[in-house]
Image (spheres, helix red, strand yellow):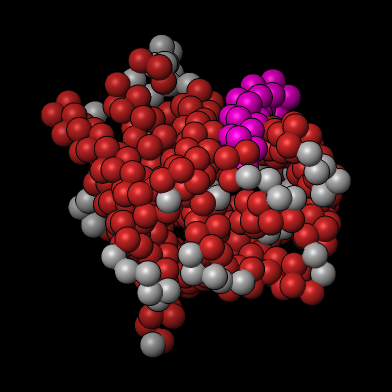
Amino acid sequence: MKKLYTNYIDSFSGLSTEIWWLALITLINRAGTMVIPFLSIYLTEDLEISMGNVGWIMSCFGLGSLVGTWLGGKLTDSIGYYKIMVFSLLATGFLFIGLQYLTTFKSLCLGIFFTMCVADMFRPASFVAMSAYSKPENKTRSVTLIRLAINLGFSAGPAIGGLIIMHLNYSGLFWVDGITCILATLVLLIVLHPKKAKIQDEIKIEKPESAYKDTPFLIFFMAMILFAIVFFQYFSVMPIYYRETHELTELQIGLLLGGNGLFIFLFEMPLIKWLERTKNTKVSLILFGAFLVGLSLIVLNITHWSGILIIGMLLMTIGEMIAFPFAHGFALDRAKRGNQGEFMAMYAIAFSIGSIFGHNAGLQLAERLGFDNTWSIMTGLAVLCVLLLFILKVYMKKNLR
């Protein structure tokens, strides 16, 4: 037991102080994203909006993410990551508070689009900040630490969110979400300054390759869009499935989703450190992770016993634990060949595109074909994702690059 504890602590060694501060800011911020898992339930039950229209609202969510990611990348290159991070966190806090006052379909489409546009400006800026604060050999583990912060916040967020809804209402949820974003801004202003960055991995390339001409990266990009479409079912369709098919309460939904984050917090860093020591390539590990995420959906059709929800969540959790850090690492590796900002923006945009189509498609399918057929179709997309990653693996081995 002592050795296990020592190995766990050792997996965090060598990371810079600034990365730890960035992780803390991310933790505070993500603890306040408790609105998002309950957004589809809030829209369908409290505001009585149809699942079809909720699908279009969630597409605005994804479109805002896409625009915000692109704009954040452009502004980060022109005025720096620090200013963008401060603006994004602070403005998002006030925008989340304001969302509770929007009740019509059109106003919600515009409000959620604008909120996500501002919120996801933070993503490319944080990628650059992480790169600046991290040593080259620690970048995969730095990504993992940030993910741990995200998931620790996400594990606490839904559980706290469920309690807030039960004892207060959805209005209280929006207030808490906004306030946590503002608190994250204050921590950022106090403890993290761009002058503290020690860029360890500055590489100047005379003739950088374009991400749009990098064949392996384009295959990877398409695979990540499919992966995102499947993965995002857990943030829009799945909460409604839990509620309607298995009749779970908001607190139970929050605890189930929160268990995902807690499991990742406890086991992802040691798992990643162990996997880094194996001879598996990043693409092989991403492939296996995508396979597990697809499997997590199809098992739901085996039985309507509610215990299968825990099995499905466990499969999805292990899948994302493996896929996300190594996908980010693969993108960073390809970025070293050319314009880093362009590559990392495309990587983030793949998930924004997945969000645009994933939420809407899942909700539309669930309303018209039912949940069981939706899970089968999404599993089919996961199979396509795995196939693309297999093609990428063969291509990389054949071309040795």
**Residue 62 is one of the magenta-drawn residues:** yes
- Report the predominant secondary structure element of the magenta stretch: helix
Instruction: Residue at 60% x, 30% y: name it.
Output: 63
**Number of numbered discs overlaid on the protein picture:** 0
Spot occupied by residue 179 in the image (x, y as percentages of width and height): 83, 56
Q: Is residue 302 left or right of residue 69?
A: left
Spot occupied by residue 322 in the image (x, y as percentages of width and height): 36, 55
Q: Is residue 271 left or right of residue 258?
A: left
- Work out which quarter of the rendered image holds the C terminus and state it: top left
Q: Does residue 245 lie above or below 383 as drawn? A: below
List the single residue furthest toward the top.
207
Instruction: Residue at 59% x, 45% y: name it.
Output: 51
Q: Which residue is nearer to you in this view: 107 or 77? A: 107
Spot occupied by residue 397 in the image (x, y as percentages of width and height): 16, 34
**Residue 129 is one of the magenta-drawn residues:** no
Q: Which residue is nearer to you in this view: 108 or 365? A: 365
Magenta segment range?
54-82
List the single residue furthest toward the left.
398
Q: Does residue 215 lie above or below 359 as drawn? A: above
Instruction: Residue at 28% x, 51% y: name it.
Output: 291
